[in-house]
């Protein structure tokens, strides 16, 4: 294993404000989303060369790459001379404030098309629509609006009607927008803009795409060792474990890239902790934007012993009535803070809630410096996704194919073998636990009380043994392990 | 006709040159110009606005003076500004704008009210504001292009009418009646009216618009739907091996509704599904209906707001039509939902009136003396959520 120099963190990317990055750089870093980018570029070219105006709305959770995609699509389209000559882009960024009325949008457009020495203090013309038409000439305005849900909420139905009639009467406007989630303004058939957008849901990057992004960023920063390591089997296994903990949001991968070295990635826990540190200000701001009751429910979910909890459990944790909790949790689900689920084998009257962003729960534990299950979860994942290295080294050194396996079915023990390197003298408890799960009979802990009191390892064992409630309460990062082990058992039994 | 790539555009503004089909509707609208005009009838997203764009282009090419405007605004003053802007843009009328401003005193404005639409100067020269009927002023200005006509195309007119109704009781009827006067009394003036919200939801008495020919805008016919689909598939570079078969499947499953054709092809393209088959198409549509991704549950959800105390009966009637493979007569439908008249005391005539309303709201279509669901897609959506 080669060693790369541990780099000092230098802000060279903007995971939270891609709109301020060079579009060419963003374009070079883009992974995946090939079809959607192609469609967007085609639609922009069509807007420049025909009278088609394909209004488009990108939908994706925070950090999914909406701003990035918009910037790259515009950049790539502008490489076409007809686009550069005919389209004018006005962007209302995701952090824009004070855009609450139809006239605020017109003012923003005018300011960007025809900057005034007085700036925002300049009075709006008596006929602002006509002023914009004059400024455009025979060109087409591409109005780029981020967080369209917020803008539409502020506009209300009347403002939305005015916006639509302006766009419709002008004939020279195309709207490109983004939103974290679908909202009434585009979902409700009774509202003016329903059916006016081509809607595209952005999925998270898959593991291969995440790895491709990290390789690009490592190469960009000159860390050839890391770029190489990411393409090895061990590097891929480490990324698999990271992906299970952190999810596949492009933002997460980009934050990670700032702190990754070969050593950090190999050890894994430092990588996750660095990621948590990078997310602190971001999560803090998001949480402060919630109402007090919403904050208490989120806190209850994060601080609870398990990943998922019922409405009753959360109501008690938050100190609110169940009806209030249910309503608030529904609202939190709409804005993608939590996800509701019905566990197939459990009482269907109960809805279980869990935090949508895998890292948010760890964020709370990290900030409160309480005992965290995170290191154990990460260890389990590392052992799961890369069991071969340790075992191969033990077997290779000891010449004994069963070396290290004496613990199977027994409580984890330290096993020393002749010729083993010092760092592999002891078989880790985690490796042993994984092996024992493969071998041991199912645990019999179906009673709800037992389930609620189990720790992570206990939940894992119970879930593998078939407990539906344990599976619901288990950290979502470990669910794929349960599914895989259950499938293995079915195969063995058949 | 050769297949040409068309860029996906579900819901946006369609270039009139990219409008596929609609020959029958377009010809009927063109003929109606000589008789005063028409009203476009059809569900949302069926393509009424795109058809109006095409109509405006055709009329302009021929030599008519066309004022096309969306009246979808919460603010009558915005409608006024938009209308003045259209007057200034119009190749026939723009030369008259300065003259009107001079006659009326000051920058032109349009006053919209239940009494009609009037031109006025923004700054009065005397204590009395001078006004002039907009339609008369425009008709006079267009005499020189006779026999070509002045055609007003008012899209989303129901929004403006409803807004005026909020300001003045009986406003919608009075406003629409004021629009009838010029097309009946002024030579050379025609009007086309359209709206996402049906006129019957805005006015009880339909006499203000009963002089206008009603042109139904429904799904495309099968050849046009397939052609449109092939052009979109070609543009998105999908289904290269079996384009015709896939286009036929998409056209069938979307019932030839252009909005859903664009939408479905867009969703398939987004998923990177270059190779398509019938099963993929069916699964995609099923999923869209079951998960309400296409917001078809709205047709159920709005029953209460549309029909009030008749909502439950409307639901039962629609269930009966949805369950039937063939069109049902009123009597067949009533026997299917049980002894409803006896149970509720509802007369057959009342049921007939409710079915008429369901037709007006595009749930059902008349087939001879019977009715069926307006489209198989809507029927499928209805059945997908039937409890």
Image: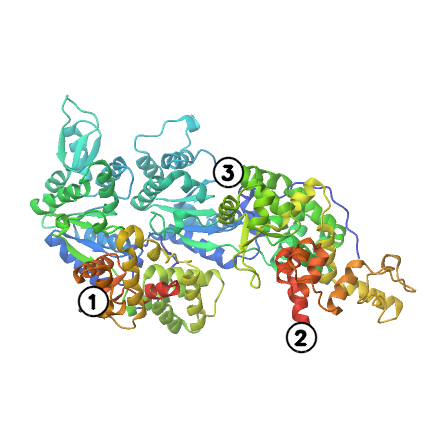
- Of circles 3 and 1, the one toward us is 1
In percent of the image, x 45 and y 50: which residue is there? A182
Q: Are dots 3 and 2 on a single chain?
A: yes
**Coordinates of residue B272 in the picture (x, y in percent):** 49, 63
Residue linked to disc 2: A491
- In the displayed image of the protein, which residue is found farthest to the top? B127
Residue A145 visible here: no
Residue linked to disc 1: B330
Mark 3–mark 1 distance (CA, rounded to whole Å): 57 Å
A245 relative position to A155: left or right: right
In primary-sequence order, the first of circles 3 and 2 is: 3
Residue linked to disc 3: A95
Q: Secondary structure beneath disc 1?
A: helix
Q: Local crowd at mark 3 within 10 Å, few (<14), some, or many (≥20)?
A: few
- Of circles 3 and 2, the one toward us is 2
B109 relative position to A295: left or right: left
B274 relative position to B160: left or right: right
């Amino acid at each position: 294993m080669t060693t790369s120099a541990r780099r000092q963190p230098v802000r060279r990317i903007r995971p939270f404000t891609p709109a301020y990055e060079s579009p060419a750089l963003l374009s070079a870093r883009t992974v995946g989303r090939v079809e959607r980018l192609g469609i967007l570029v085609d639609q922009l070219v069509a807007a420049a060369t025909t009278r088609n105006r394909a209004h488009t709305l990108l939908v994706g959770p925070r950090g999914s790459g909406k701003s990035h995609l918009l910037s790259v699509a515009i950049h790539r389209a502008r490489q076409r001379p007809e686009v550069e000559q005919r389209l004018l882009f006005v962007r209302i960024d995701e952090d824009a404030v004070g855009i609450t009325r139809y006239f605020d949008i017109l003012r923003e457009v005018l300011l960007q098309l025809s900057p005034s020495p007085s700036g925002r203090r300049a009075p709006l013309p008596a006929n602002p629509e006509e002023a914009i038409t004059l400024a455009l000439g025979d060109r087409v305005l591409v109005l780029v609006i981020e967080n369209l849900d917020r803008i539409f909420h502020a506009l209300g139905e009347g403002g939305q009607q005015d916006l639509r009639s302006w766009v419709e009467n002008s004939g020279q406007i195309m709207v490109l927008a983004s939103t974290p989630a679908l909202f009434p303004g585009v979902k409700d058939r009774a509202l003016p803009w329903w059916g006016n957008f081509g809607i595209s849901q952005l999925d998270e990057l898959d593991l291969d795409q995440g790895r491709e992004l990290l390789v690009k960023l490592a190469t960009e920063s000159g860390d050839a060792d890391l770029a190489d390591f990411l393409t090895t089997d061990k590097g891929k296994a480490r990324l698999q474990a990271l992906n299970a903990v952190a999810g596949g949001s492009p933002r997460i991968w980009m934050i990670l890239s700032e702190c990754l070295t070969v050593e950090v990635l190999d050890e894994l826990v430092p990588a996750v902790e660095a990621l948590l540190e990078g997310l602190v200000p971001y999560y803090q701001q998001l949480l402060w934007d919630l109402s007090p009751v919403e904050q208490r429910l989120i806190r209850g979910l994060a601080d609870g012993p398990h990943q998922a909890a019922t409405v009753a459990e959360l109501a008690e944790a938050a100190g609110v009535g169940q009806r209030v909790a249910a309503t608030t949790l529904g609202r939190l689900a709409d804005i993608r803070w939590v996800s509701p689920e019905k566990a197939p084998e459990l009482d269907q009257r109960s809805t279980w809630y869990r935090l949508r962003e895998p890292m948010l729960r760890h964020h709370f534990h990290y900030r409160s410096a309480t005992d965290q299950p995170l290191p154990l979860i990460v260890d389990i994942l590392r052992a799961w996704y890369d069991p071969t290295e340790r075992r191969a080294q033990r077997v290779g050194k000891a010449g004994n194919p069963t070396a290290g396996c004496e613990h199977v079915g027994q409580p984890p023990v330290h096993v020393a073998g002749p010729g083993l390197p010092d760092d592999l003298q002891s078989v880790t408890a985690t490796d042993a636990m994984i092996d024992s799960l493969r071998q041991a009979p199912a645990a019999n802990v179906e009673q709800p009380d037992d389930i609620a009191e189990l720790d992570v390892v206990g939940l894992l064992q119970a879930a593998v043994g078939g407990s539906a409630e344990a599976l619901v309460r288990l950290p979502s990062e470990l669910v794929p392990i349960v599914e895989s082990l259950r499938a293995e058992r079915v195969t063995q039994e058949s | 006709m050769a297949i040409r790539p068309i860029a996906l555009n579900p819901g946006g503004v369609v270039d009139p040159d990219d409008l596929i089909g609609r020959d029958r509707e377009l010809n009927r609208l063109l003929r109606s110009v000589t008789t005063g005009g028409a009203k476009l009838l059809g569900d949302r997203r069926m393509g009424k606005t795109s058809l109006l764009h095409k109509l405006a282009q055709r009329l302009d090419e021929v030599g008519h003076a066309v004022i096309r405007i969306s009246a979808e605004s919460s603010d009558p003053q915005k409608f006024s500004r938009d209308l003045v802007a259209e007057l200034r843009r119009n190749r026939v009328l723009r030369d008259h704008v300065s003259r009107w401003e001079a006659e009326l005193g000051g920058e032109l404005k349009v006053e919209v009210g239940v009494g009609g639409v009037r031109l006025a100067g923004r700054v009065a020269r005397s204590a009395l504001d001078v006004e002039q009927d907009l339609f008369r002023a425009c008709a006079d200005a267009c005499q020189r292009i006779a026999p070509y006509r002045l055609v007003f195309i008012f899209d989303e007119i129901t929004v403006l009418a409803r807004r005026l109704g909020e300001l003045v009781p009986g406003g919608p009827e009075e406003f629409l009646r004021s629009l009838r006067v010029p097309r009946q009394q002024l030579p050379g003036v025609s009007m086309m009216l359209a709206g996402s919200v049906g006129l019957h939801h805005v006015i009880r008495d339909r006499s203000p618009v009963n002089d206008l020919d009603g042109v139904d805008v429904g799904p495309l016919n099968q050849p046009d739907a397939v052609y449109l689909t092939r052009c979109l598939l070609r543009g998105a570079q999908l289904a290269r091996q079996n384009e015709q078969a896939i286009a036929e499947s998409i056209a069938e499953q979307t019932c030839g509704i252009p909005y859903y054709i664009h939408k479905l092809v867009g969703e398939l393209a987004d998923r990177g599904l270059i190779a398509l088959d019938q099963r993929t198409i069916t699964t995609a549509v099923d999923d869209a209906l079951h998960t309400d991704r296409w917001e078809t549950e709205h047709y159920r959800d709005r029953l209460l707001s549309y029909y009030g105390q008749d909502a439950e009966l409307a639901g039962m009637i629609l269930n009966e039509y949805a369950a039937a493979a063939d069109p049902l007569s009123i009597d067949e439908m009533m026997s299917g939902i049980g002894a409803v008249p006896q149970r509720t005391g509802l007369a057959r005539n009342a049921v007939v009136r409710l079915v008429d309303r369901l037709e007006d709201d595009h749930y059902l279509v008349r087939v001879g003396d019977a009715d069926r669901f307006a489209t198989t897609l809507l029927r499928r959506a209805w059945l997908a959520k039937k409890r």
